[in-house]
């Protein structure tokens, strides 16, 4: 309980209103409202600046990523072309050095594979049937 000095009227709030700034009345409330609005505007301004900075940062990195992807794709296509041409050149050299034996051997091997497959299928069906 708060004690009031002698000679002053006793207030039901015990002087708390006076101590908390209530003596300013409506001007105090308007001052606080203006302060809150000012803080909100400052916070909004900082947020806008942060978003603008972040957008610029992301856009810069996005351009860099797109360039890296394009260069990587170009490198991969060139490697594929180089490997394909190397394989083609090797195949042509093999064919030229074998003088037809490679082609005939491939045909004979393919024919043998078909005959072996057919005989295996025939044996399999005759055993199971």
Image (tube, rainbow, N blue to C red):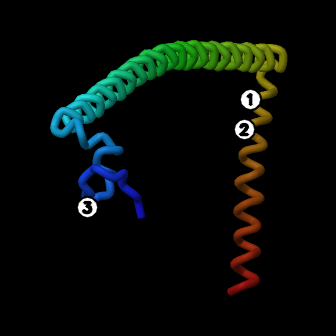
Q: From this view, report whether residue 117 is shown above or below residue 91.
A: below
| Residue at the spot of label 1 | 103
> Are dots 3 and 2 in contact, CB under 8 Å?
no
Closer to us: 108 or 19: 19
Closer to us: 78 or 11: 11
* Residue shown at 70% from the left, 63% from the top: 118
Give the percent coordinates (x, y) of residue 59. Answer: 44, 17
Give the percent coordinates (x, y) of residue 102. Answer: 79, 28
Mark 3 or 2, nearer chain start: 3
Q: From this view, report whether residue 6 is shown above or below residue 43.
A: below
SS of the residue under disc 2 = helix
* Residue shown at 68% from the left, 13% from the top: 82
User: Which of the two discs, 3 and 1, sits closer to the camera?
Assistant: 3
| Residue at the spot of label 3 | 12
Distance in Å between CA atoms under marks 3 and 1: 114 Å
| Residue at the spot of label 2 | 107
Which quadrant of the figure has residue 51? top left
* Residue shown at 40% from the left, 59% from the top: 2
């Amino acid at each position: 309980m708060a004690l009031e000095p002698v000679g002053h009227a006793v207030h039901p709030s015990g002087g708390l209103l006076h101590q908390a700034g209530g003596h300013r009345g409506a001007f105090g409330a308007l001052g606080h409202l203006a302060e809150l609005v000012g803080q909100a505007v400052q916070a909004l301004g900082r947020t806008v600046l942060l978003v603008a900075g972040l957008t610029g940062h992301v856009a810069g990195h996005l351009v860099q990523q797109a360039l890296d992807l394009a260069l990587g794709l170009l490198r991969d296509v060139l490697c594929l072309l180089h490997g394909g041409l190397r394989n083609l050149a090797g195949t042509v050299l093999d064919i030229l050095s074998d003088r037809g034996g490679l082609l005939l051997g491939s045909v004979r091997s393919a024919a043998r594979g078909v005959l072996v497959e057919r005989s295996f299928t025939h044996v399999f069906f005759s055993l199971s049937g």
